[in-house]
Image (tube, grey):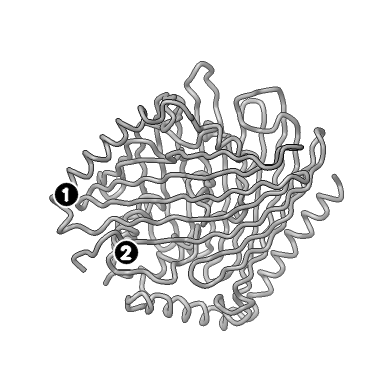
Amino acid sequence: MKSLETITLGLALSISALAAASGIPQAQSDSQSQAQTNSKLSRASHPATPDRGQRVFQQNCARCHSAPESLSPSASDAIVRHIRIHANLSEADFRALLHFLNP
Amino acid sequence: MKTDRVSKLSSTHQLARAIPLAAILCALCSFSTSALAQQDPAIISGGIGLLTTTNGGNTSYFPETRPVAVLPLGDHLQIETRATILANFFHRPGDGYDHFTFKTMDYLQADVKAGSHATIVAGEFLTPFGTYNERLTQIWNQTFQDLPLIYGVGTMNTGSALGGMVRGNVFANDRASVSYAAYYSGNSTSGYFGTQRSSGGQAQVYLPESGLEIGASYGRSLGAVHENFEGMHLWWQPIDTGFRFRSEFGRAPHAKGYWFETDYRLQQFGGAESALGRLEPVFRMQQTFRDAPDNNDGLPFVDTKRADLGLDYHLPHEIRVHTSYGRQFSPDGNVNIWETSLVYRLLIPTWKSKH
């Protein structure tokens, strides 16, 4: 049991250290992530602007799952309404996300 | 834990039980017909997967799908439902492979927007206790395919409630967001609505700048035995990084336990869609402590530890491959658990809309 605890602690620290180390190229990572998000949403026929809606998306939706590779405008309304319930979005965040995905 | 979920299956009288359910759905469809031409379309989403588990040397195969349907009806009402359909092909010693099928409705709920801070939910819904039940039981969202050992704490074992719930956001700005949920559930022994009388709720604070969320949950079973369940959760997901930390603690009257998991998508190596950036090492640790025997809280009968280490790979076109190895330690014996899965996420608008 002791060895399991040691292994557990070691793994947790390793993953944390790996994550912390990624902070060094953070600016590059951030810009790549931003570009990828924009790319994804461009493919989904949504103009991607770094506004509040995008931040809401990153802060709420991405907590449970990754962004879909494509998202048709006709599906976005129902999805955002689903997210509003399950992520307890405020009214302002709901409208910002709706505008972001379906401007 | 899969057997716990499978225990909800009732193989008898399903046709009779399906009739009122079909009537409800037909009524909803009729109600919505006049609005369809001007409405946002319904969507069908969810996950389809092939899962395997090798536990103590015995391998089982689980083809599984969890479809979700969302039907908006006007600006203030929507209907949501999710089902689980799976088969289990398992090895019967000396007798080759056998199988059974399992299907259940996870939830069928109507969401009524009651204001900017509240939504009223009626029907069968996922019990709002902790985080796993509401957020991670969809196979697409799961980091590991097994439920945590403490999953039964506060979720009344079935994970579903039949009654009413009010939930919403109390306060939100750029620095903090406070949200809540409170529910009451009646008792139902139907094969589709397997719930028990209970009540409870949760509250949580999310700090967007740090990606930190802290919450507390409370549940009380109101059946033959009245019992209290308490839980706390802490999630940390720094924005714009591939790192996630999730954890929960749950306490039942005669047992308690915790789980935490971390995962880190290697997106700093060429981006999240590069060959290396699609890799995601994952790790989960969990432990339960038994104070006294209790057949109803869903936790192991003896103190148990389990550690899982896995590797996910996110393929293009919404496909994910998952592999993991776990070892469980308990006085009943230690076992190795190997798991693999191939999961596909689907998202389908059901018809063209006004857009």
Which residue is denoted by mark 1 in the rendering? B33
Q: Quadrant of residue B297?
A: top right
x then y, percent, for residue B227: 55, 23
Amino acid carrying label 1: it is Thr
In this rendering, the label closer to the viewer, 1 or 2: 1
Is residue B270 left or right of A37 when viewed as pictured? right
x then y, percent, for residue B343: 54, 59
Tag 2 secondary structure? helix
Amino acid carrying label 2: it is Ser
Q: Which mark is residue B89?
A: none
Binning the other alpha carbons within 10 Å of mark 1 as few (below 14), some (14 to 19) or many (20 upward) gives few
Which residue is denoted by mark 2 in the rendering? A76
Task: State the residue at coordinates (76%, 34%).
Answer: B303
C-beta proximity under 8 Å, tags 1 and 2? no
Tag 1 secondary structure? helix
Task: State the residue at coordinates (40%, 39%).
Answer: B125
Decide: is B297 above or below B231.
above
Q: CA distance from mark 1 to mark 2?
A: 21 Å
Please give the chain letter of the residue carrying mark 1.
B
The outermost residue toward the front is B95
Identify which residue, B39 or A18, lies in the foreground: B39
